[in-house]
Amino acid sequence: MKKLFILLAVALLVVGMSGMAAANGSDGNFAKVDQDGWGNDALVNQTGEDHIGLIYQDGWGNDSDLYQDGDDNFAIVKSMGEFNSVSQYQDGDDLLASVYQDGFANKAEQYQTGEDNKSFIGQLGCFNFARTDQTDEDDFAIISQNGAGNSATINQY
């Protein structure tokens, strides 16, 4: 567990230091996508004010989609390996979502509405699935997966 938190912190630093594409909108929104490898796909869609969306992909065929609406939301993805996928959806205020993946064919989904919710997903290995749903206020979720074929869902309503 401690190793996973360290890896998440490193992901934040690495994505913050390197960049391939970045945009800063008139509403204070900031999006940055950094890709290394082949066939990676990333989408950042921001509506509202003062969002930060960061995606770092290293490998082959990784896919990350990030949707932010509301105000002051932060989402970060670090996906390394092959054919990993991430979906992050935030509609509210002061939401935090973080995904770290290293492996093959892992899938992570984070859905957040409300206010002040925090979700962290870490996946090491292959064919893992993780999902968090948060619709209230001040919810906190962590999923940590290491190995193959694990599945976890956290619902906080």
Image (tube, helix red, strand yellow):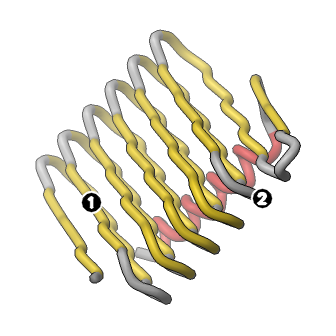
Tag 1: Cα neighbours inside 10 Å, few (<14), some, or many (≥20)?
many
Q: Which residue is mark 1?
A: 131
Residue 7 screen position, x and y as percent: 55, 59
Return the mark for residue 50.
2
Q: Secondary structure at mark 1?
A: strand
Number of the front mark, 1 or 2: 2
Question: Horizontal placement of 23 versus 150: left or right?
Answer: right
- For mark 2, give the secondary structure: loop
Identity of the residue drawn at 56% across and 61% down? 8
Q: Vertical placement of 116 versus 61: above or below?
A: below
Q: Residue 19's spot in the image, x, y percent?
A: 78, 31
Tell me the residue at 25%/57% (across/down): 130
**On screen, 64 above or below 4?**
above
Q: Residue at x 57, y 51 (%)?
A: 68
Q: Which corner quadrant holds the C terminus?
A: bottom left
| Left or right side of 12 for 143 | left
Residue 17 in the image, given as x and y percentages of width and height = 82, 43
Q: Quadrant of residue 153?
A: bottom left
- The residue under label 2 is which amino acid type? Asp
Between the residue at mark 1 and the residue at mark 2, the CA separation in whole angstroms equals: 25 Å
- Residue at figure coordinates x 28%, y 41% from the top left: 106
Check disc 1 and give the amino acid type. Answer: Arg
In the figure, residue 82 lies in which quadrant? Answer: top left
76 left or right of 141 in image = right
Is 82 situated above or below 66? above
Q: Earlier in the sequence, mark 1 or mark 2?
A: 2
